[in-house]
Image (spheres, rainbow, N blue to C red):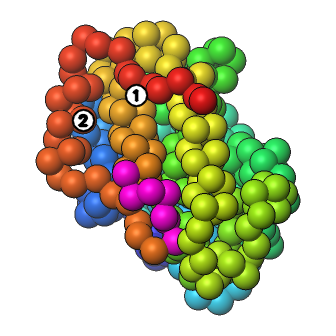
């Protein structure tokens, strides 16, 4: 979790070094600040990552009154915008926000997503789930676009499709883990349509109905990846490579779900190191990202 250090000023160099240590000490499916990133952007990516990581840690792991802690986090964010940030992560973020003229909205939406996590653990409809993704996933894509100099609504719209697809992929990959935390992200309306129940999920009841339900989720998510693909040729240089890598990675996880017969109640599909390495190579090749057509 982000340090709550407030005693004494923190230099900008120290602040960015703190964010770098935080970012590089956490393993993700794909490195947050990969070697593909321009060196000049890395400190700012680290700063944005530190913010995103910190607010997620508060929403998922913090002890005590998480809503109050999130209120404090928002207060510190607002200090970034009036030039009085105190904590190391926010001192760095303050400079990044100034340099790239990033509005507060995407940061505030991430706070709201974590507030939602404290109040909501079921989603009635797919539209409700998409509304959650609007706060939990899509702001991250907007922040990346700002760092690379893109501010237009069309690129943001395409980014939203990809980020939502990545968020949904994570949900389908982690059905069991989320159940253990008391959360169900599969829309209840769709569970009922396929003849599945909450009790069945909690009991680990895998049958043809659940398999069909997850196959439906996987295919719809694959379609969202397809909708976001036009963003790749709409950006330049290394961001294009990273977008290809994230899309390929998300699609590979969907493939892995299919490979285990959609039984995410008993197994967590994941990518081997060899498969990740191959995806990194494929991202460098001048080929389109393959997306199967939905049935």
Q: Is residue 244 left or right of residue 190?
A: left
Let me know if residue 264 is in the magenta part: yes
* Residue appearing at x 31%, y 63% in the figure: 26
| Magenta-tinted stretch | 259-265
**Depth order, front residue of 53/10:** 53
Dot 1: within a 10 Å radius of its alpha carbon, few (fewer than 14), some, or many (20 or more) residues?
Answer: many
Element class at badge 1: helix
Of the image marks 2 and 1, the number of the one nearer the N terminus: 1
State whether residue 269 is above or below residue 241. below
- Prevalent SS, magenta region: loop
Q: Is residue 65 left or right of residue 53?
A: right
Dot 2: within a 10 Å radius of its alpha carbon, few (fewer than 14), some, or many (20 or more) residues?
Answer: some
**Depth order, front residue of 287/15:** 287
Task: Answer with the quarter of the image where residue 269 lies.
Answer: bottom left
Let me know if residue 122 is in the magenta part: no
State whether residue 271 is above or below residue 287. below
Q: Position of residue 31 (x, y in %)?
A: 28, 47
Residue where numbered disc 1 is placed: 243
The quadrant the C terminus occupies is top right
Q: Position of residue 42 (x, y in %)?
A: 30, 38
Q: Position of residue 37 (x, y in %)?
A: 27, 31
Task: Answer with the quarter of the image where residue 115 lies.
Answer: bottom right
* Residue appearing at x 82%, y 55% in the figure: 193
Q: Position of residue 52 (x, y in %)?
A: 52, 54
Task: Answer with the quarter of the image where residue 77 lies.
Answer: bottom right
Observer-side mark, 2 or 1, equals 2
Residue where numbered disc 2 is placed: 279
The quadrant the N terminus occupies is bottom left
Q: Is residue 290 left or right of residue 165?
A: left
* Residue appearing at x 66%, y 15% in the figure: 154
* Residue appearing at x 38%, y 21% in the figure: 289
């Amino acid at each position: 979790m982000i340090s709550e250090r407030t005693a004494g000023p923190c230099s900008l160099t120290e602040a960015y070094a703190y964010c770098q240590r935080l970012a590089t000490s956490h393993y993700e499916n794909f490195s947050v600040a990969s070697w593909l990133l321009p060196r000049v952007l890395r400190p700012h990516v680290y700063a944005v990552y530190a913010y995103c990581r910190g607010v997620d840690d508060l929403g998922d792991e913090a002890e005590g009154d998480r809503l109050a802690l999130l209120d404090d986090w928002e207060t510190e964010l607002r200090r970034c915008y009036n030039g009085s940030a105190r904590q190391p992560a926010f001192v760095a973020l303050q400079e990044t926000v100034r340099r790239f003229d990033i509005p507060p909205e995407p940061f505030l939406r991430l706070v709201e997503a974590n507030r939602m996590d404290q109040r909501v653990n079921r989603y009635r409809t797919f539209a409700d789930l998409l509304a959650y993704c609007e706060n939990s996933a899509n702001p991250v894509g907007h922040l990346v676009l700002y760092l690379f100099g893109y501010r237009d609504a069309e690129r943001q719209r395409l980014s939203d499709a990809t980020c939502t697809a990545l968020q949904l992929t994570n949900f389908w990959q982690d059905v069991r883990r989320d159940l253990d935390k008391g959360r169900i992200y599969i829309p209840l309306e769709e569970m009922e349509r396929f003849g599945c129940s909450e009790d069945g999920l909690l009991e680990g009841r895998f049958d043809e109905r659940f398999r069909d339900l997850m196959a439906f989720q996987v295919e719809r998510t694959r379609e969202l990846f397809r909708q976001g693909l036009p963003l790749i040729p709409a950006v330049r240089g290394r961001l294009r490579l990273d977008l290809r890598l994230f899309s390929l990675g998300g699609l590979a996880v969907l493939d892995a779900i299919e490979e285990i017969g959609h039984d995410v109640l008993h197994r967590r599909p994941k990518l081997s190191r060899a498969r990740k390495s191959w995806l990194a190579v494929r991202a460098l090749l001048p080929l389109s990202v393959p997306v199967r057509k939905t049935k």
